[in-house]
Image (cartoon, coloured by chain):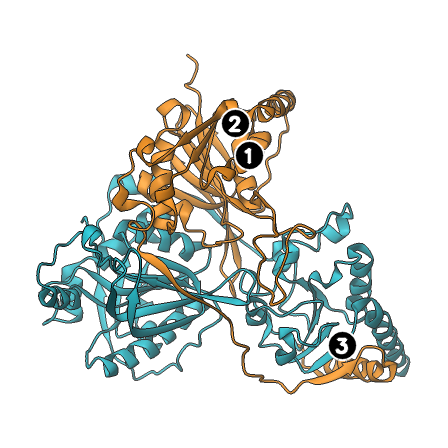
Chain colours: A cyan, B orange
Amino acid sequence: MSGVTQNSEPSTGDLARIESYQHLYVVIEHEEGIPVPVSLEMLGEARRLMDNFNVKYSSNEKVVAVVLGDNVRHLCQELIRFGADVVVYADNHSLKHYTNLLYTKIICQIAEDKNVASSISPNRSENYKKPRYMFFSADNTGRHLSSTVLAQLESGLASDINKLVISDLEIRHEHKTKGQPVKFEKTLEMYRPDFSGFLWTTILCLDNRNPVTAREYHPQSCSIIPGVFEPITKEDQRTGTIIDFEPQISDEDLRIKVLSRNIIKSTIDFESCKIIVSYGRGIRDSPEDNFKLIEQFARALNAEIGISLPISKRPYQTKDQHLLSYMIPERVVGTSGRKVSPVVYIAIGISGAVQHLAGMKESGFVVVINPDSDAAFRDECDIFIKGRLEEVLPTLTEHIKKHMLMIEKRA
Amino acid sequence: MPVRPLNVGVIVKLEPDFSEGNVSYNPDGTLNRAETKNILGPHSAAATLAAFYCKVKYDAKVAIGTMGPPIANQALRQAQLISNADELHLYSDRIFAGADTLATAEVLRLGVSRMNNGLGADIVISGHRASDGETGQTGPQTAWKLGYPFIGNVIDFHIDQEGKSIYAKRFISLYGFYDVIEEIQAPLPVFISADPSYKPSFNTISERLSLARNLNEARNKADNFEKYLQVFNSEGLGADPRYVGLPGSPTIVYKVEKIPKAKAKRRVEFVDGNDTVKLDMVAKKLIQLMTEAPIK
């Protein structure tokens, strides 16, 4: 499995590549047999991409869902209704809970299995080696699983992707093509927002076509940010192929044991509160005092308090333990934290990086308080209050208290 | 018979310091790398703390490695101050430049095997993810290449030295689902990543005494950190040039662009923050929404 090939004739090589790498495999995550939301989102995007792919390249490559677990057969039909052409499932008691080692081995067994490939496309699987593309979730489980699976399959992986395009690209790269222009067909362009949320980096996974170090890199793989892609509308009539895969499990693999598993309910309740007030780096001029203003405002509205990602990295020197308890990852709204959809979302001193917007865009009504009227948030809100929070919040809080008092008196 | 000392390896990274006052942003909101200081990343620091826990509790040997240019030795010095490490490794070679996570993992795999006087490590610890790259892939890929089982997002652990196994608690967030804490048992050698929330605790008197002694030693060592520093180039690691740097990287960065603004879905109304009459209208609107909305 060195992955090194020597193609003396490019035309044969191209043909071999087409046959060797096929389909888009989507690794499904579920909890006790219920798919987690990102699994259906990945299937939705896979469906859209492969529908276009098959038209554009006059081919018939499939969306293949891969699901592991204990008693997961019932899940397969559901995955087909949400866009899979094929579901390969491995059902075994030792797969009840995710362990990285065993899951990695079995996913690789499935990805490299010729019998599975010939069940998927009977006439085109003779030279099958590996999937063409592979999707994972960018959550705690999928992030690690994708890393180890791709280390085993010896190919490339981009993480935290929020846009995907398949295209033919002419590439000239110092190493990959030895500086010569080379056309790479059916290349997956994987778009990744950087930590600031303002830059998009496009990652490609490309074969080395440099004759000195020629090497094939497939599948082209990525982990996908939960909450960014839409699932397709469930179609009860959709049909597909279900493949029961018999995994090979050795005693060695079973030495990693899940001894216990406890579900924890967060004490921070973003789900049942009507209003969420979030703050960001806009508190910087006087973090302690400004947080007091935010807290008073939130209390007047009976709101839960959220934060933007930079705040969870505790960028301010403060000994105020109360404030520090509001600078924790559990309070982050966005792709690195929680996805929320309250009746009202109020963003104070938050610029509006895409990762943050992805976490709150389903909110009912959005109010922004920010001195910079060019902040990215201006396009994602209903009311934009231009001003410093130090000046706006005291007035706004007073008004709210006044009206609430009147309502209480009336009642 | 005394048990053989526990050998611990840590992999860390020098990263931009994102704390207020140190981080500098360009007008367009992107990071100004030239103006921003570099430090031992916070997640690397959490990994280093986990190694310190092994030092205090099990009297472990600790080696810390990083891949990077010569200035990355600053990360090693900071990590030694936290962990009282016995060995510091810098894996540095021009041909490592441009490596993606898979090619980086190849260097770190070779580095770990040279830790602790060539004995390697019974437990390797990495951070959750770097603050700048943020892929979180390098740790698990290094683990896989070493052939060690990987346990991610560890919030607490202890080692059974006689039984040669680890008991670890890990935190799992399922985004849009509930969170889970799992308890895992695995044989050594093992690779863990420390969750950002990881904090060791030292409770017994002997642990407290050991803690004080180790903190003191750490200060003395870090003052002379170069004495503990070993620099390895590609040849010194025995790296195959085809599997490191650019040739060993399946992925490339094709382009970098500004993220275009999404099409506005809402019709925004601008309010002057000094206009108290307008702010009163906003207050009324908020209360109206709050009181009229059905309870979920």
Residue A2, placed above or below residue A112: above
Residue B144 placement, left or right of B216? left
> On what subunit does the disc labeled 3 rest?
A
Residue at the limit of the structure toward the top, as seen here? B1
Q: Position of residue A315 (x, y in %)?
A: 68, 52
Residue at 39% over, 22% down: B117
Q: Which mark is residue B216?
A: none
Please state which amino acid type lies under the numbered disc 2. Ala
Tell me, yes or no, whether dots 3 and 1 are on the same chain: no
Q: Is residue A276 visible?
A: yes
Q: Residue at x 34, y 58 (%)?
A: B251
Tell me the SS state at disc 3: strand
**Badge 1: few (under 14), some or many (20 or more) residues near its Cα, within 10 Å?**
many
Q: Which residue is mark 1?
A: B79
Task: Judge whether residue A97 can be spotted in this image.
Answer: no
Q: Amino acid at mark 1?
A: Ala
Which percent across, then down, holds residue A236? 33, 82
Tell me if mark 3 has few (under 14), some (14-19) or many (20+) residues whose alpha carbon lies within 10 angstroms of its own: some
Residue in front for this viewpoint, B286 or B132: B132
Residue A11: quadrant of the picture: bottom left
Q: Which residue is at 77% across, 84% downward?
A: B285
Left of A292 or right of it: where is B238?
left
Residue for badge 2? B85
The numbered disc on residue A386 is 3
Tag 1–tag 2 contact (CB < 8 Å): yes
Q: CA distance from mark 1 to mark 2?
A: 8 Å
